[in-house]
Amino acid sequence: MEKPLRKVIGGMRGREGMYVLPPDWSHVVAFLNGFSAGRKGSGLSCELTLFEQWLYEKIGNRCSSGWDWVVLNKFAEGDTQKALPKFYQLWDAFLQDEIP
C-alpha cells in the first residue's frame, strides 16, 4: 500500500521552506493536516491518525487535543522552535515501532 505521507515528510525534512512559507511549526502542521485530509477520501492516508494514537500511548493518556498539540506541549515544552525537530524524532520512532 502506498504511504504518501511518509514520502512528503521525508522530502520535507530540512527543506520545509519548499513546502510552506514561513517554515514554522504552525504552517507545517496546517500543511500536513491538509495533505492528510485530502488523502482520507481516497483511503490512502490514515497515518496521522495512527501517529496520534501512538502519541497517546506514549503519554499514557488520550486527550482531546490532536497530534500537533501533543508534540508541542508534551514533548517540546510549548516551544515552537523545538516542536519541528521533536516531531521528526517522534515520527521516526513511530515508524520504527510500526509493524511492517
Image (spheres, rainbow, N blue to C red):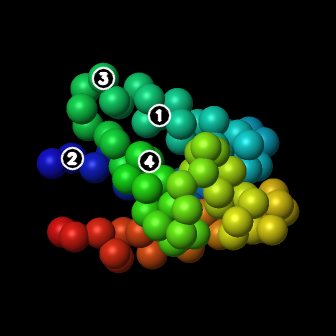
Q: Residues within 10 Å of mark 1 (few under 14, many from 20)?
A: some
Pointer 3 or 2: first along the chain: 2
From the image, state whether disc 1 or disc 4 is nearer to you: 4
Rounded to the nearest angstrom, the CA distance separating label 4 from label 3 is: 14 Å
Q: Position of residue 9 (x, y in %)?
A: 48, 54
Check disc 2 and report the residue beneath it. Answer: 2
Check disc 3 and report the residue beneath it. Answer: 41
Q: Secondary structure at mark 2?
A: loop
Q: Residues within 10 Å of mark 2 (few under 14, many from 20)?
A: few
Horizontal placement of 6 versus 1: left or right? right
Quick check: 57 above or below 49?
A: below
Q: Secondary structure at mark 4?
A: helix
Regarding residue 3, the answer to whether it shows in the image is yes
Check disc 4 and report the residue beneath it. Answer: 48
Pointer 1 or 3: first along the chain: 1
Rounded to the nearest angstrom, the CA distance separating label 1 from label 3 is: 11 Å
Pointer 1 or 4: first along the chain: 1
Q: Residues within 10 Å of mark 3 (few under 14, many from 20)?
A: few
Residue under the point 35% across and 30% down: 39
Residue under the point 18% across and 69% down: 100
From the image, state whether disc 1 or disc 3 is nearer to you: 3
Residue under the point 54% across and 69% down: 60
Check disc 1 and report the residue beneath it. Answer: 35
Pointer 4 or 3: first along the chain: 3
Q: Are marks 1 and 2 in contact (CB under 8 Å)?
A: no
Q: Position of residue 82 (x, y in %)?
A: 77, 67
